[in-house]
Amino acid sequence: MDILSSVCHISAVRFSHRYCFATVHCLPRLNIRSSLPLPVQKAKYHKELEAAVDAVEKACRLCVDVKASLFSSDGRVLVKNDQTPVTVADFGVQALISLELGKLFPSIPVVAEEDSAFLRSSNTLVDTVVNEVTAKASPTNKPWTQVDVLEAIDRGGKNAVEFRSKPATYWVGLALVVEGEIVLGIMGCPNWQEDLIEKPTANFEKHFDVPSETGVIMIAHIGCGTWAKRFSNVQNSYWTRCSVDGSDLVQKARFCIPDSQTWESLPLYTAFNATNNAESLGNNQILLLQTCCGSLCKYLMVASGRASVFILRAKEKTIIKAWDHVVGMICVHEAGGKVTDWEGKEIDLSADQIGRRIIFPSGGVLVTNSNLHDQILLLISQNSVI
């Protein structure tokens, strides 16, 4: 889990500094000022969602604090053996989420990226992580110890649990999967760079009434929609229901792709050229949005209506991690969008029968506003070999 540079995006146990949240194109008529915008009688997993939102808000604050300290001290950004950047916040956030959810739902396992092996190799780093976590965690009768924090991290590690082939219930990324079905999800972005996003609209400013630098929390619950609110001053902010955009022509759609891939590597390249300039769209050109890193950022963009399509190619020898997609899937679904592989099949979360850590989408992942889904699947089938 890499986290914290100029932007911090949090989705429970998958946290990356490179993600950001763009302007939210939501439905201003549906503003609700409350702890959660969902009716208890309709939201079966209201209790779990409430606890997870609280945990993500704590994790957001941890990231903000660690980011602030990053600029005043050395040694906060480290490198694991595989050269993946990792920070105090990566371990701290995973430990914090695991502690908070484990306390309330001890029987539900966590699927996460980190384990404590690297952390245990540095006493200084361990102490820093423990201090950050205990400062944000909910109070208990017995103070959290170093052992508690390390065990909380390992609770989500690679060999922590084996699911086998039967339908499983677990937390991942941070979504709750119940017997194989995603039932809720929470994403948070406490910071982002202003020049990475469009300026908010008048309605957006009116209904949120806080600066755009304050971050966003997005939630989804099966059958109850996708909602977002500003992160800052969370007790007094409004939940606003989010919706995908209404584009129904590929040429008019707004696309985003992984930062590690190019438009030329995707099958739609044979039909359309791509440009980042919305003012100079020509014939057979589509608008490719400039975004920051991370797949979950792209799901957020589609769920909020800023982007129409996110398309990702599954490359040989590249592992697609479940925590990079699962929470985004329910946020897009509940906002009216659609997520499949390139053959139009739903993503199988149980394909990794042992750990539920990897997904295997045929060809790649296609995330759309639903209107465009079949059109783009047809283009893919005509221009690529899956």
Image (cartoon, rainbow, N blue to C red):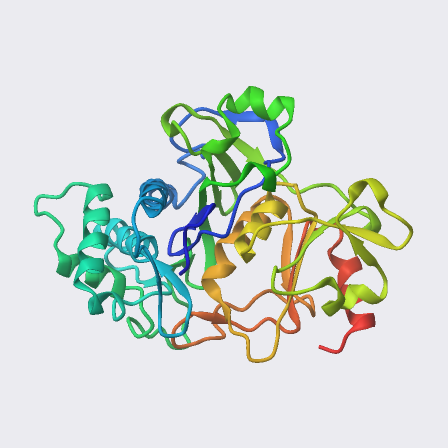
Give 2 or 142, whichever is nearer the viewer.
Answer: 2
Q: Is residue 251 left or right of residue 186?
A: right
Q: Is residue 170 left or right of residue 194?
A: left
- Residue at the far left: name it: 142
How many badges with numbers are in the image?
0
Q: Position of residue 296 (x, y in %)?
A: 53, 54
Quadrant of the drawing holding the N terminus = bottom left
Q: Is residue 30 above or below residue 11?
A: above
Q: Looking at the image, can residue 378 be seen?
A: no
Give 49 or 296, whichever is nearer the viewer.
Answer: 296
Residue visible at 13% across and 43% down in the picture: 140
Q: Position of residue 50 (x, y in %)?
A: 35, 40
Q: Is residue 320 left or right of residue 314?
A: left
Residue visible at 53% across and 25% down in the picture: 31
Residue visible at 49% across and 32% down in the picture: 213
Give 86 or 98, whichever is nearer the viewer.
Answer: 86
Q: Looking at the image, can residue 348 be seen?
A: yes
- Residue at the far right: name it: 283
Q: Position of residue 52 (x, y in %)?
A: 35, 46
